[in-house]
Image (cartoon, rainbow, N blue to C red):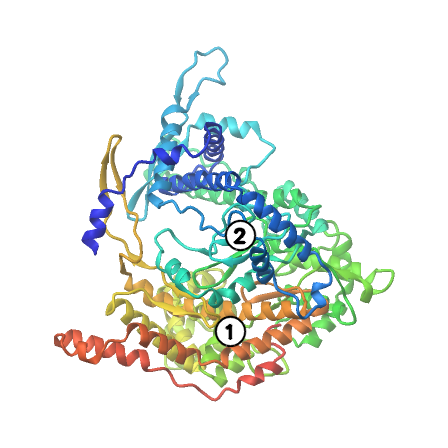
Amino acid sequence: MAITQHKMKKFKNISIYPYLKVLDIQQYKEIVLQELRKLAEGSETFSPSTNQLYHELGHQVRSRYIIKYKKTNGIMGKTQQLYSEYLDWFLDPNKKNDPRSLNAREEWQKLLHKHQEGPTINVDDHVWPITVLTGIGRFLYNIILRDIKIDVNVQRGNSKPHWLPAFYSVYRVSGHKSVEEIKPHPVLSRLYRQAVLDDLVFNVSELPMLTPPVPWTSPTSGGNLLVKTEFIRLPSSASLQLERLKTASPEQLYPSYDSLNQLASVPWKVNQPVLDVVIHVFNTGGDVKLDIPQPPTVCPLPQPITTDMTKLERFEAYRQRMLLRRRKAEMYSLWCDALYRLSLAQHFRDRIFWLPHNMDFRGRVYPCPPHLNHLGADMARSLLCFARGEPLGPNGLNWLKIHLVNLLGTKKRESIQGRLDYANEVMPDIIDSADDPLNGRKWWCESEEPWQTLACCKEIVAAMRHPAGSEKYVCHFPVHQDGSCNGLQHYAALGRDEAGGFSVNLLPAEVPQDVYNCVANIVERERAKDAESGNNIAKVLEGFVRRKVIKQTVMTTVYGVTRYGARLQIVKQLKDIDEFPKEHVWTASSYLVGKTFESIREMFTSTREIQDWFTECAKLIAQVCGQNVEYITPLGLPVVQPYSRSLKKIEIYTKTGKVQENFSLDKFERPNVMKQKNAFPPNFVHSLDSTHMMLTSLHCEQEGITFVSVHDCYWTHPSTVAIMNKICREQFVSLHSEPILQDLSKYFIEKYRYNDCEASKDNQVIYKSKSKINTVLSDVPQRGDLQLEKVLDSVYFFS
């Protein structure tokens, strides 16, 4: 198979001439000019590799061609007709109260069935091979590099014109290889900086929609109205999962479609009062404490290098210059990201918009627009609120107050009533923050999530000052409910681990349990024993085994963090403690990693057993069977891990010289055993996490309440938090009442098990390997005694 693929690759340099004729010359000009600006305004220290640039440019040509094709063949006209009728249904206020009402997918399918005449709109968009996309991009970049010139004396008054290429190739070392990048001439970059253009250009697929997205009805139909939206985000080499989606029955994927459609149907608007404050801070130089990026111009000038410096001083000066350059590049990247987000928020400030959604290969859901969405950090989340408001009702104001205290991050061990009491105590600070955020006492600035805290302060004060009372106040503000170390919750439920389940709030308790503090206490107990036995590093760590030091390691254990990765996490935390002796950082981190892993194993007995079984299954499937690990989520989504060992790059000789290319497809490559086995446990837990979220979203839609999520953080109106909490717990119990591990084992056995008769014909080594995989795949870990139904009464399961 590898030889066949090798031969195929030699002949993949197909003619791209027909693809270069699909658009008018004017459209190619627009594409190239837009690319010129993107390159000229890019970062000095980083740019994508040429292969990425080629592929993206080819994709732009293809996107324009698809729109032209739909317009020419009548598909656009029919889409407009169907969409008009769909909007009539979408805006019908009576459908919400009608139990017989169809959901978005069913309504769209009904319209497709009703209007069968004329062109079909569910055509599989013309798939261009990656070789074609890259070839088109390379052709257009040859024009950019060879034919675009700049007069480098343009700013020198009376100097004669001196024309040089406006762009050139550079080679930068990345890891163990050299990567080709394309950079603008410094004069061109300077001209763009001095021009201070007052507009930003985005692809339409990167922007929110001003109308509801098209419902997902197939892997190729949904999302944006005309521009193609990918149902699943996959690398170009991942073809196996696309094949599994095509061969799956349509009904199997309906729950995934319906959940994406529900999330995309939520209308949003910009929180204008908060946006105005953020823009003011951004325009006045940013603020590191508030996580508003500062412009790179605030960096100090580098130390001058003089002739009287010693060799060591000169070396240190050059090192500081390199660090300063790296810092400026990072600051510029963060500043540009904030600029894009705030510019888009300002553009959409008076509009209602929607966010189409898709998912990654594991089923985790993401909004498609990358800049203006609710998936970002604190500032990004504070800028958005629901466009559809709901009256607060009798308990809504209390939920706003509880949410505010949750955002502060200082009362995580308090009960719900304790948090509410604290909110009432600090009401003067809340009012001051809302009325005068920048010149008052700035209480909100001390929060873990300052911008969301400010937004919540303003909402609470607005509700309290409503003329008809807070119960009548129409609230657009989303309240969040977070899972308590969600990955460990799923592991504890899978293994019915009662002790572990209690520590992650699967069981009722008067106050929330803190798994990180529990692990820290066990580590401290073991450290004290070692210190008594004379262990020097245990003595050094006295007083430094803190919750914050081991929190990230505990959190990422369920996602497959290695000992080395965990050690780096703890090193970072120890370095941030001023009192800790820095000469012991590495030794102490190694000691703490071992103790933390042992403590987690002690607390979560079933978690490590299940994780080890996942890892062993994936290792044998990749190593013995030579296949990528596949599974089906409880909601029916086929998943294929896209980790393969790419073949050596093939050298192709063209008229322009030698080109190295490697367009691999996972179905032709051998799996990467290390990545397959390390990634399977976290990927499967992510799939369970996503399944729980999707089930919650579908049942919230049936109840007629607003629901959106950021993975394991669920959002709804303050007045409907209780309903969402009830659904969230019911669906978690429903999900884990299924025999998930047994079903996974059964699927693995059907797909990867070797027939005993066939295996007996192999030599002794191969026979033992095949026998081992047959045994391991069926050896499902035993479960404990956790009563899953108690989750229904756990207040702090999601809180």
Amino acid at the residue labelled 2: Cys
Residue at horizontal 45 percent and vertical 87 percent from the top? 784
Which residue is label 1 attached to?
516
Q: Residue 588 bears which disc, if any?
A: none
Above or below for 789 versus 705: below
In this image, 594 relative to 93: left or right? Answer: left
Amino acid at the residue labelled 1: Tyr
In this image, 352 relative to 542: left or right? Answer: right
Above or below for 672 versus 45: below
In this image, 740 relative to 426: left or right? Answer: left
What x and y, as percent, mark residue 735?
51, 77
What crowding class fits label 1: few (fewer than 14 Cα within 10 Å), some (14-19), or many (20 or more)?
A: many
Above or below for 323 versus 232: above
Mark 2 and mark 1: Cα distance apart in space: 33 Å
Report helix, strand or loop for mark 2: loop
The reply to whether callout 2 and callout 1 are in contact (CB within 8 Å) is: no
In this image, 662 relative to 291: left or right? Answer: left
Q: Residue 368 bears which disc, if any?
A: 2
Using the rendered image of the protein, determine whether residue 544 is visible from the camera's viewpoint: no
Report helix, strand or loop for mark 1: helix
Q: Which quadrant of the view contains residue 397?
A: bottom right
What crowding class fits label 2: few (fewer than 14 Cα within 10 Å), some (14-19), or many (20 or more)?
A: many
Q: Which quadrant of the view contains residue 680?
A: bottom left
What x and y, as percent, mark residue 684?
42, 69
What x and y, as percent, mark residue 583?
39, 61
Q: Which sits in the foreground, 127 or 366?
A: 127
Q: Residue most toward the bottom?
A: 785
